[in-house]
Amino acid sequence: AREGRTTIVIAHRLSAVRNADVIAGFEDGVIVEQGSHSELMKKEGVYFKLVNMQ
């Protein structure tokens, strides 16, 4: 159903975006990292910190 479509999701609950193809992490309105859940967890950046806070 989602094939061939682009969907932008803004979420406070990170479980809502965990299965997304691409996740972008923002700081002060600027994208500072992007990748899949597993890629971002390995980077231990903004997304990693938010996941571990929840």
Image: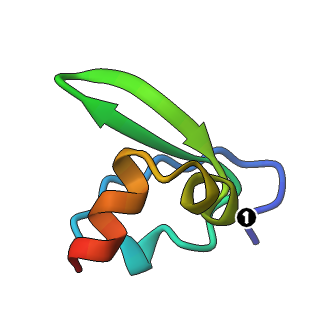
Residue found at x 82% / y 59%:
3
Q: Where is residue 14 in the image (x, y as percent from the top left)?
A: 36, 71
Q: Residue at 23%, 80% (x, y): give it.
A: 54
Residue 44: x and y in percent read 48, 53
Q: Position of residue 53 (x, y in %)?
A: 21, 73
Q: Which of 20 and 39 is in front in this view?
A: 39
Query: In the picture provided, is 39 more to the left or to the right than 44?
Result: right
Give the residue number, with chain letter if any, for mark 1: 2
In the picture, the quarter occupied by the N terminus is bottom right
- Please tell me which residue is depicted at 73% across the width and 64% down the height of the picture: 2
Percent x, y for residue 28?
Answer: 17, 23
Is 20 situated left or right of 47 in this image? right
Task: Judge whether 19 appears above or below 2 on screen.
Answer: below
**Residue 53, relative to residue 21: is it above or below?**
below
Q: Which amino acid does label 1 sit on?
A: Arg
- Which residue sits furthest left? 28
**Above-or-below relation of 12 to 36:** below
User: Badge 1 local density, few (<14 within 10 Å), some, or many (20+)?
Assistant: few
Residue 29: image quadrant is top left
